[in-house]
Amino acid sequence: MVQPIYQSSIFHMPDHRVAAATEHAVHPHSYYSRWGNPTVSYLENQLSALMGTEASLVFPSGMAAITTTLLTLLGPGDRVAMSSALYGDTTRFFLEELRRWGVVVSLFDPCEPRALPALIEQGARLVYFESISNPELRIADLDAIHAACRGRPVLTVCDCTFSPPGVLAEGQRPADLCLHSLTKYLSGHYSVFGGSVSGPQALIDRIWHQQSLYGSAIDPQAAWQISQGVKTLQLRIARQSASAALLAEALCGHPRVERVFHPSLQCGPGTAARRHLSAGGGVLSVSLKGGEAAALRLVERTRVFGLSVSLGGVSSCIEHAQSMSHSMLDAMDAQMLAQSGARIPPDGLVRLSVGIEEPEDLLQDLMAALDD
């Protein structure tokens, strides 16, 4: 009923002929666990079935999945079109690391990607974006992005962490390659790190060669834990999405709230692209009147919402985006950031990750903290 954990770094081979042949195999799952492992393969098959893709690879973290994928697909002199609204460490990897290695990086707005066709005409060979941006919940216009790339020699790569199955509408394919931080919704219990990339077998095979070379292998125990979380994903997503939508509606009318961001709401950039979603997900963001001081006051006054940096799990979390999940942007060159056009979270923005607690308890907790 529950798959076993193959907590082994090596596997006994039946004879030398098989051992020698396996040395030249792609992604063998019973030879050397840096290359593959049966427990890890089980999770990869789960993810491929969920995403509707030919193949998947699992990594020890979401950033490992992102960086390994990009380093496989890009080289010196290549051009890439990057979304202006990304997670802080992803932004930093593009603007600092990839540029340092000779990759030309240009930015576009994923909600209104009018600049994207011109970037592709200029030679961009890869387009990178988040389906729902972190932390402002801006929804990418998949139709416009796909139209700009159709028939062109360009790969699309989408970080789908905020739109796992159950949020993304069934049958939707955001990009050629779909990335996930498995640390978030897929595992769902804040107990393990992981990342993944899913897509066509040929591309996944290319990325596997780099993954095995870089040693970016997940531990079988971690893969097993994520696999158990995946089994309850649909139940958790339904509960979290419904609770987050309820909170978003309630917060819209609060006198200390300037703006609420959640895909269920009728206002906000990118909401026309809601047709690609079947639910809003469990994350919402709130921009408070009073800026950073008001935000810090709120995050320290909640009791059910724990002050923590992650999202997507069974327990509700709250954070000040600018100083926590996106604080790494402060370490970057301010002039370069301004010139690039990368979005920096407003200083009054609070990100909330809604868990599976009673919605009324969550609502009372937020209202009490806001009114304190």
Image (cartoon, rainbow, N blue to C red):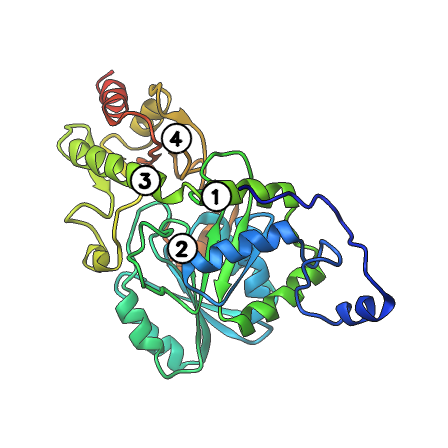
Judge by depth and name the residue closer to the eye, 247 or 82.
Answer: 247
Residue annotated with mark 4: 317
Other residues around mark 1 within 10 Å, as few (<14) / some (14–19) / many (≥20): few
Other residues around mark 4 within 10 Å, as few (<14) / some (14–19) / many (≥20): many
**Between marks 3 and 2, how big is the CA–CA gap?**
14 Å
97 up-or-down from 22: above or below = above
367 up-or-down from 264: above or below = above
Q: Amino acid at mark 2?
A: Cys
137 up-or-down from 248: above or below = below
Q: Secondary structure at mark 3?
A: loop
**Going from the N terminus, do you reach mark 3 or mark 2 first?**
2
User: Could you tell whether 229 is left or right of 213 in the image?
Assistant: left
Residue 160: give its label.
2
Residue annotated with mark 1: 330
**Between marks 4 and 1, how big is the CA–CA gap?**
23 Å
User: Could you tell whether 306 is left or right of 61 in the image?
Assistant: left
Q: Is residue 102 visible?
A: no
Query: Residue 354's spot in the image, x, y percent?
Result: 33, 34
- Residue at 42 percent across and 26 percent down: it is 307
**Between marks 2 and 4, how big is the CA–CA gap?**
20 Å
Count of numbered labels shown in the rendering: 4
- Residue at 49 percent across and 74 percent down: it is 79
Q: Amino acid at mark 3?
A: Gly
Q: Amino acid at mark 4?
A: Cys
User: Could you tell whether 282 is left or right of 191 in the image?
Assistant: left
Q: Nearer the viewer, mark 4 or mark 3?
A: 3
Residue annotated with mark 3: 282
Judge by depth and name the residue closer to the eye, 308 or 338.
Answer: 308
**Going from the N terminus, do you reach mark 4 or mark 1 first?**
4
